[in-house]
Image: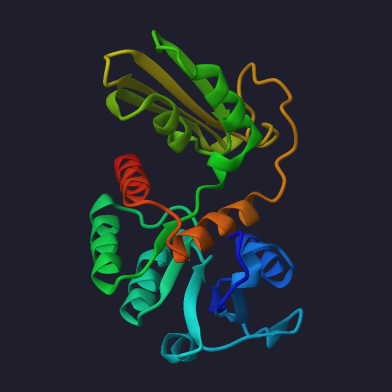
Amino acid sequence: MNTEPRRKFGVVVVGVGRAGSVRIRDLRNPHASSAFLNLIGFVSRRELGSIDEVPQISLEDALSSQEIEVAFICSESSSHEDYIRQFLNAGKHVLVEYPMTLSWVAAKDLWELAEQKGKVLHEEHVELLMEEFAFLKKEVVGKDLLKGSLLFTRHSRLTWLVSLFGELSLVSATLEERKEDQYMKMTMCLETENKSPLTWIEEKAPGLKSGSLENMPNVGINKNIFLKDQNIFVQKLLGQFSEEELAAEKKRILHCL
């Protein structure tokens, strides 16, 4: 993106919850990648009229508009697959919040559709842009995993584990749930390709610190992670990712699904 934009891609944001609101904010602010994007409007099931002078448009208009070339899908997870399919079939590039779909089969099908249409399909992974992940990555570089255990609270980090240790296979899994306390604990015993054991524990309950990792030092504040993800997407639009990089990312995402 170290060049002046020759053109701007028209963008529609679908869904204006937390993620969608952040996307609109980043698109409207003068960032390097935003210079390549032109926010045309947003789609919502609610009648909102406009948000910060950005007009609400219908889904039908977003799909048929020649001005709109890119869709940011920020709706609830269960709707992602249908929206992606509609926008790809309409000839639009797609950025979608994680998860792309709720099944491996659907994601594989959508990726094939994107390739047929010659369009970018990008799944957001802001967890890979966090300071905690950068710290862990430095810690494991050049080391072989003999045995590991990771405890997370609230936010899933399966992508972390695959990015750090390679493809994993499932050995066993248990789920403990106390509905009266709104408590849930998942314990997964995994195995690396080298047969090293890795235990992933996901714990959720009121009062648990968000995104806390056992024995994780304070490694700084996560800043502008959605904007960093937007930067990656724009680089893909501009053809600045190699085929090898794109294939490796696709392989990782499908493996996690």
Q: Is residue 178 above or below residue 239?
A: above
The answer to whether residue 16 shows anywhere in this view is: no
Spot occupied by residue 158 in the image (x, y as percentages of width and height):
44, 35
Q: Residue at x 42, y 19 (%)?
A: 199
Q: Position of residue 162 (x, y in %)?
A: 39, 32
Quadrant occupied by the C terminus: top left
Residue 169 visible in the shown view: yes
Q: Residue at x 57, y 31 (%)?
A: 133
User: In the rendered image of this protein, does residue 67 appear above or below residue 124?
Assistant: below
Residue 183 versus residue 88: which sits nearer the camera?
Answer: 88
Residue 192 coordinates in the image, percent (x, y)? 31, 20
Between 34 and 170, the one lying in front of the other is: 34
Q: In this image, 13 relative to 35: left or right?
A: left
Q: Quadrant of the N terminus?
A: bottom right
- Work out whether residue 241 or residue 91 is closer to the camera in this orientation and state it: 241
Q: Residue at x 50, y 53 (%)?
A: 124
Depth order, front residue of 114/3: 3
Colour mapping used in the image: rainbow
Indicate whether 91 appears above or below 144: below
Left or right of residue 256: residue 59 = right
- Residue 208 in the figure: left or right of residue 253: right
The quarter holding residue 161 reads top left
Residue 197's spot in the image, x, y percent?
35, 14
Residue pictured at 67% horizontal, 31% vertical: 208
Q: Quadrant of residue 169 in the image?
A: top left
When asked about the image quadrant of residue 34, the answer is: bottom right
